[in-house]
Image (cartoon, rainbow, N blue to C red):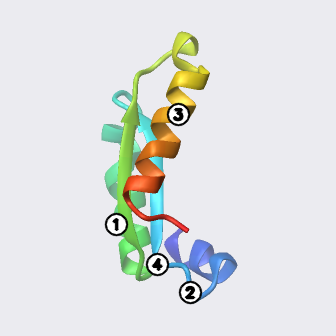
């Protein structure tokens, strides 16, 4: 839950990235995002393609670029 993550992350943490895919995010992403927002986080989702073939350095680069562009610390 968002409150548990807030407890672990501390008050200084303001943003949370949710990295998911187009199959899982529609099922669970909204509830997770709402819980995090209720705990005071700004939520930034990033959807990546589904499947083992996308677990690559190129996908990791996409995630890191997203984090940098959204000024995650």
> Alpha-carbon distance for marks 2 and 1?
19 Å
Q: Total of numbered circles in the picture? A: 4
N-terminal of the pair, mark 3 or mark 4, is 4
Q: Quarter-wise, where is residue 4 in the image?
A: bottom right
Residues at discs 3 and 4 in contact (Cβ within 8 Å)? no
Depth-wise, is mark 1 or mark 4 nearer the camera?
4
Classify mark 1: residues with Cα within 10 Å, few (<14), some (14-19) or many (20+): some
Residue to which mark 1 is pinned: 34
Q: Is residue 9 left or right of residue 19?
A: right
The quarter of the rendered structure image containing the N terminus is bottom right
Residues at discs 3 and 2 in contact (Cβ within 8 Å)? no
The answer to which of 11 and 68 lies nearer the viewer is 68
**SS state under label 3:** helix
Spot occupied by residue 40 in the image (x, y as percentages of width and height)? 41, 82
Spot occupied by residue 58 in the image (x, y as percentages of width and height)? 52, 23
> Alpha-carbon distance for marks 1 and 4?
14 Å
Residue to which mark 2 is pinned: 12
N-terminal of the pair, mark 1 or mark 3, is 1
**SS state under label 1:** helix
Residue to which mark 4 is pinned: 14
Q: Which mark is residue 61?
A: 3
Spot occupied by residue 15 in the image (x, y as percentages of width and height)? 45, 70
N-terminal of the pair, mark 1 or mark 4, is 4
Depth-wise, is mark 2 or mark 1 nearer the camera?
2
Classify mark 2: residues with Cα within 10 Å, few (<14), some (14-19) or many (20+): few
Residues at discs 4 and 2 in contact (Cβ within 8 Å)? yes
């Amino acid at each position: 839950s968002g409150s548990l993550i807030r407890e672990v992350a501390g008050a200084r943490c303001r943003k949370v990235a949710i990295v998911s895919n187009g199959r899982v995010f529609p099922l669970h992403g909204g509830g997770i995002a709402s819980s995090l927002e209720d705990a005071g986080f700004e939520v930034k989702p990033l959807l990546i393609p589904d499947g083992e073939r996308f677990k690559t350095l190129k996908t990791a680069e996409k995630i890191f670029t997203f984090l940098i562009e959204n000024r995650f610390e």
